[in-house]
Amino acid sequence: MRVVGLFLLLSLTGCTCSGPRIQLVSAEDAGLPPECVPTVERCNGVDDDCDLLVDEEQPSVECGVGACKRAISACFQGAPQTCTPGAPTAETCNGLDDDCNGAIDENLMPAMCGVGECAIVQSTCAMGSAQTCTPGMPATETCNGKDDDCDGTVDEGLLTNASGDLRLTNDPATTDFVYIASATNGFGLAWQDTRDGASMKGDIYFTTLDKQGARRGGDVRVSTTPGISTHPALAFTGSRWGLVYADDSVDNLELYYRAISNTGQPLGAPVRLTSAPLDSDWPDVVWTGTEFAMVWEDERAGNNRQDLFFMRFDTNGTRLGNEVRVTTDPQRQSYPILKWSGQGFGLAWTDWRDGNREIYFRRLAVDGAPVGAELRITNNAADSAWADLAWNPDRAEWALVWHDTRDGNAEVYFQRLSDAGQKLGAEVRLTNAAGFSGYASIDWNGFEYGVSWQDERVTMGRPAIYFMQLSGTGVKNGNDLRLSSGSGSSTFTTALWNGNTFAFCWRDDRNAPAGNTELYFAYVGCP
């Protein structure tokens, strides 16, 4: 027998192989079927193709995408391998697909910077590099409904009484206790009017206005009782008005509800809401989206004391739950103002417990239950009274205004409160003029407050209505603007945002006969 080399055997006689071992055959066996035939190399720890190499030329395997992509050998120590991709991470600006979804630097939040006309929304990532947001350049402020100089205020110092003083009522009797509230496309207006009856006792009237103060109908008499009807308050549901007022026809002053259509027509009969000894008076009412909520001052405890109570009711005047006594101090709490934040209520009032009048605030839950302690807003030896309250959804905080005599004469002050009812910063004095400045009203329009008040800076004893723009932090923007132009006394103003600009309503005695008061309306705009 001869030993035949491996390559010769492969070419002539075939072979039997297992790993690096070689089986020799005799020359006489040439031409006979080989004992083995080389095969395709597999992952099995054997030299299947008889080239003295084991599991060679096995392909690599890839799996995953982006930063999760992995590549491994398909075979290790004779065993096939499974590829497992890496774990994704949050996408960051680095030119990589961190979250392994096949996209690079996607869905990164853009940056917002600047205010007004300088505001810009810019990508925070470009070509894998973080980008800095650069606001636009400010321009000179012009009266165009825009914040050209990018200071957070629109048309500051440039607005004027664009409508002129619009007279709303016209009868020879006294018109008083006006309450104006916003609707979808305008306003509802309720007031006490003494035109009916020999005793000139006062009844409640109602009308609707468009956003510019134009009348949509005539005066609608809501109450027709033999007693006194007074102190109305309004809220709009989106389809009808809810009107509450005090009336003493049955016995003492009690509160009544009247539903009124969107066009100003009373719906159904008045519904009596309260029934307690002594007077229930000075209601305020809001619509929460599902029901009405009302607060009022109540004398049922006697001894010349007044407490504040809360009630919920539906659009038919049906009470929901029980009355809630909000204050329990033995002194007097009066002139409540109620606002809805979307999650609860804010309540402000004038309080006598400290020897002089002070302003207090309290949060209420959706059912009227007090949340936390009462917060004393003012704390000085002077007189602080007649608060108004606004909810600021953009800053998630409350804003209060009131008048205060700590400076010798009455001036208007401002205070911010957190959603939780805590003071934010110090009180801000808004007015600084000779004579009385007070009975302020405030509303928020999405970027600034509008504040109106009555002011005697020009003629003592004959107040006029003024307006100011105020930043969200209480910084005045521009100068005080006089709204009313008559020679009489303009008093008890309300400021409301109409969706386009601030609008105002007030009581005015400029018209004959002497002593007669009528209602006026105005809105601010560009000259």
Image: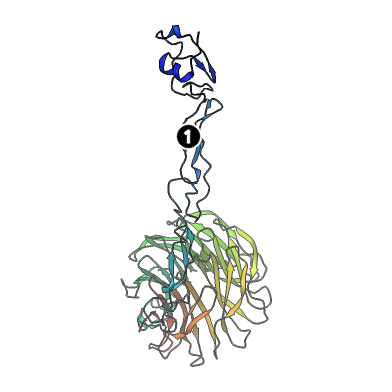
Displayed quadrant of residue 358: bottom right
**Farthest-out residue, top:** 28
Left or right of 1: which side holds 326? Answer: right
Question: Is any atom of residue 306 visible in this view?
Answer: no
Numbered-mark total: 1
Q: Which residue is mark 1?
A: 60
Q: Residue 175's x, y, as percent? A: 42, 79
Q: Residue 500's x, y, as percent? A: 38, 72
Q: Nearer the viewer, residue 72 or 245?
A: 72
Q: Residue 158's x, y, as percent? A: 41, 84
Label 1 crowd (10 A; few <14 / some 14-19 / many >=20): few
- Can you say whether 78 is above or below 527 in the image? above
Residue type marked 1: Ser
**Farthest-out residue, bottom:** 459
Question: Is any atom of residue 382 visible in this view?
Answer: yes
Quadrant assignment for the C terminus:
bottom left
Q: Describe the element under mark 1 as helix, strand or loop.
A: strand
Q: Nearer the viewer, residue 456 or 26?
A: 26
**Farthest-out residue, front:** 2
**Farthest-out residue, left:** 217
Query: Residue at the location (50% across, 46% down)?
Result: 67
What colour scheme has been applied to the protein in the rendered image?
A: rainbow
- Can you say whether 498 is above or below 90 in the image? below
Displayed quadrant of residue 515: bottom left
Q: Residue 230's x, y, as percent? A: 47, 72
Displayed quadrant of residue 243: bottom left
